[in-house]
Image (spheres, helix red, strand yellow):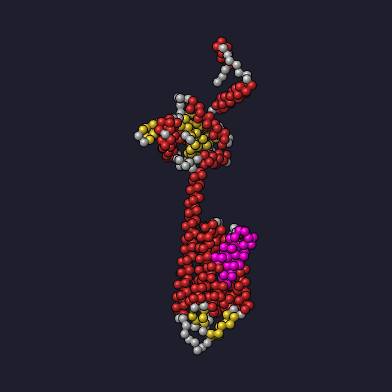
Amino acid sequence: MRVISCIVTEHNLWLVLLAALMCVTGCWVTIGLLDRARKTVGVQMRGWLFLTAVAAGSSIWCTHFIAMLAYQPGAPITFDPALTMISLVIAMVGTGAGFGLALDKSRGLAPEWGGCAVGLAISAMHYTGMMAYHVAGIVEWDARYVVASVLIAMAFSAVAVGHAVRRPYRWSHYLGIGLLVLAIVGLHFTAMAAVAVTPLSFITTGTNPDILEAMAVAVAVVGLIVAATGFASYLIDERGRLESFERLQHLALNDALTGLANRVSFNDRLDHEIERAREGEETMTAVIVIDLDRFKEINDLRGHAAGDQALKIIARRLAKLTGDGEFVARLGGDEFAAIKRFRDQNDLLGLVSRLEKSLFEPLQIDDFETITGASIGVAVYPRDGADQERLVSNADLAMYRAKNDVTRAVCFYESAMDETARARRALATDLRLAIERGELAALSGADLGSDRRHLRL
């Protein structure tokens, strides 16, 4: 009740509210900067610690100074400028040391001990500031309130910094802000309740109250500017981190040469489209595998720089012709792939036709013109495969069928292709085993003619 009475009856309430605004803003910025220091190491961490100490010390000092100006002892007052500045230095250095200790990972209770150090720094700043506060009267102190104020500052600061550094809960960040505000406010007003001033009537000179109010506003403005500077640093760093993340994400999901989606993105998108089709939507998904036919000739005749340029031109063309429900990626080398979500077969044929037309258009590379051409294989979910691996494998089979057929560039998967592929794999396995066992023998022309009907390639 003594503390509450002190606030209500012995303070200018609108300046108290101004001090509270300064305190909340400063603590919000301080905990944010401390969190950024927590996530960094080395020189970066020390830089963020410095900003944290500046923001914390200046906001604590400004809160204290404004609240001191709000105090109405009933007697003229003056300030010692040297001690006032020393109290600011104590706030910055003390909180910086406390936060530095809190981030020492080699100590188990470092955050709590660091918080205690911050509480001591707040207390030292306050009572140094009180020494700079000269009032024309007899000043008496109640030691019980003094001790209680220091304990309040240390206890709340320890818990606040502990939550801010350890972050055991999702809302620990905001809890840390609130507890740090309580540490500063609890110390100040408990300490002010320890003071009893008996005015001396024969001293009438002091600072004009209007000037004191103007000083409080000026201090608040400067304090908010300092806090805003710390917050701006935080935002700039956050934006830089976000840009770095987006750049790394782009490198991870996109082809470095062409800018198209890479194999990882292709697989993710195909999984998504298959899952979407499985959930009952009346759509089908087609996988289109594309292999350039005469790309090697460009590399051999004109060099790899020309080959890279050709790939970039083709990638730009493919990217431009895709629309809603269509996706294009470069899988590697001269191999591209597309995904098409469709309901009507004509939609799929439309995309395949656009792809074929684009891939057979001439390429102008430096001083020569060429046409690469391409072989295109198509497989459709769920008709041609129930999962990603099967679907892509069947599209590859169709693409190789198109590559071996000079009369067409596009081939749709057919189940007979699997039988042919299995027969070739079985034949290759049998020949390998026959070589290992020495079971192959040379045949004469007559034997070869009579057994030709048994050979199947």
Residue shown at the point (53%, 69%) measured from the top left: 91
Percent x, y of residue 449: 55, 12
Q: Is residue 176 visible?
A: no
Residue shown at the point (54%, 65%) measured from the top left: 96
The magenta segment is: 95-123
Depth check: 256 or 253 in front? Answer: 256
Q: Is residue 34 above or below residue 127?
A: above
Q: Is residue 248 visible?
A: yes
Quarter where residue 275 is shown: top right
Q: Is residue 92 above or below residue 317?
A: below
Depth check: 64 or 402 in front? Answer: 64
Q: How many marks?
A: 0
Depth check: 62 or 416 in front? Answer: 62
Percent x, y of residue 103: 58, 60
Quarter of the rendering occupied by the N terminus: bottom right
Q: Main secondary structure of the magenta part?
A: helix
Quarter where residue 122 is shown: bottom right
Residue shown at the point (51%, 73%) measured from the top left: 86
Q: Is residue 228 magenta?
A: no
Q: Is residue 437 left or right of residue 342?
A: right
Percent x, y of residue 189: 57, 75
